[in-house]
Each structure stands twice: as structure tokens, then as C-alpha cells.
Amino acid sequence: MKLRPLPLLLVAALPLAAQDAAIGLKAHGLVPMSDLRNLTNGQTGLGLAVFVEIPISEGIVFRPSIGAQQIPKGDTLGLAGTKTSVTSVDLMLDALWYPGDDPKQGPYLVGSVGGQQWRVSSSGSSSEVISATRLGVAGGIGYQASPHLGIEVKGFWSPIRANLTATGLSLGATWRF
């Protein structure tokens, strides 16, 4: 999958630097639950995102991001000889609220909403590829340890199709430049 819009988004975000916006990276691990856990036999995944933080007020920050997640192939429970992997590419908007009104340090709450392009690929005795673009939501808590480093834990949810929902936890770190 080509990510041609990424360089354009980064160039478009450069003027925001004059408005105290910051560009950053986020790396996170995924712990799938429910349907995803059954599909991949509990394999953990990894994700990476590029974001721009835009301060809205003293304690509120918007953080649009573009990212990707990968859960490697695992044995699908209930389907002997079938292995399934799950990937997603997403465009999300996070809203961060710092109760202490200091986005450079301290705890915060985070809520996310956006579009996710899911791809579920099964191979073996029951081969199938599912692709779907759906709404995704997430919410959790974080701690800004320094002006550059933050840590987050979020729960996520996105319906892939009628009998398949992506749910789980992500644990990640953010780095502001």
C-alpha cells in the first residue's frame, strides 16, 4: 500500500510550527482481544504513527496522525491449518486533555476517532482476504514524562464486518521533535 499523502501532510504541517505545533512519532504494541485474539491466536502486534500536535488551549491538544498496525500470522482458533494476519492503516484525530493545564509534563486523558483501512488475510485450509474501511475509536490515559517523551495506554474498537470487530489494548510511547 502506497502512502503518498504522508510527505504532503508533513510539508503542509510545517507552517504550524509557528503556532507552537510539534511533529512527532508514536510507536506502540497491540494486545488483541475477542475476535482479533481468536483470529491470530493472541499474537501481539506493533504499530507506528506520525503525528502533529496542535495546542488548542492551556490543557487541550489536538493530534492528527497517520499510522499503521501489523499483527503477524497466528493459528486461527477453531480452523486447523489456517493462519491469519491483520493489518490496518489509519488516519486518526486524538484529543488530549491535561488536567494540570501543562502539556509539557504530567498525566492526560486521550480520546481518538478516525478512519481505519483493515486487511485480514487468512491462508491455509480456509483462505480469505477481507478489506474494509471503517470508523475507529480509542480512549485511554497517558503521562507526559518530559517535553519530548510521553507514554500511553489505550483501548481501541473498530467493526471490520458484521461478525468481526477489532478490539484490544495498545501500549505506546510518543516522541515530540
Image (cartoon, helix red, strand yellow):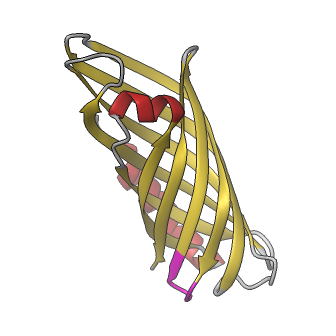
Q: Nearer the viewer, residue 54 or 70?
A: 70
Question: How many numbered marks does the figure carry?
Answer: 0
Residue 131's place in the image compared with 167, above or below, is: above
- Quadrant of the drawing holding the N terminus: top left
Is 22 situated left or right of 19 in this image?
A: left
Q: Position of residue 119 (x, y in %)?
A: 37, 27
- Asked if residue 31 can be seen in this view, the reply is yes
Residue that appears at 42% across and 29% down = 38
Residue 134's place in the image compared with 142, above or below, is: above
Q: Position of residue 130 (x, y in %)?
A: 38, 17
Residue that appears at 80% across and 84% down = 100
Residue 169 falls inside the magenta stretch: no
Is 151 situated left or right of 120 in this image?
A: right
- Quadrant of the drawing holding the C terminus: bottom left
Can you tell which quarter of the image residue 118 is in? top left
Residue that appears at 54% across and 77% down = 150
Q: Nearer the viewer, residue 100 or 8?
A: 100
Span highlighted in magenta in the image: 145-150
- Asked if residue 3 can be seen in this view, the reply is no
Q: Position of residue 67 (x, y in %)?
A: 43, 50
Residue that appears at 24% across and 17% down = 80
Q: Position of residue 6 (x, y in %)?
A: 39, 51
The prevailing secondary structure element of the residues shown in magenta is loop
Residue 8's place in the image compared with 151, above or below, is: above
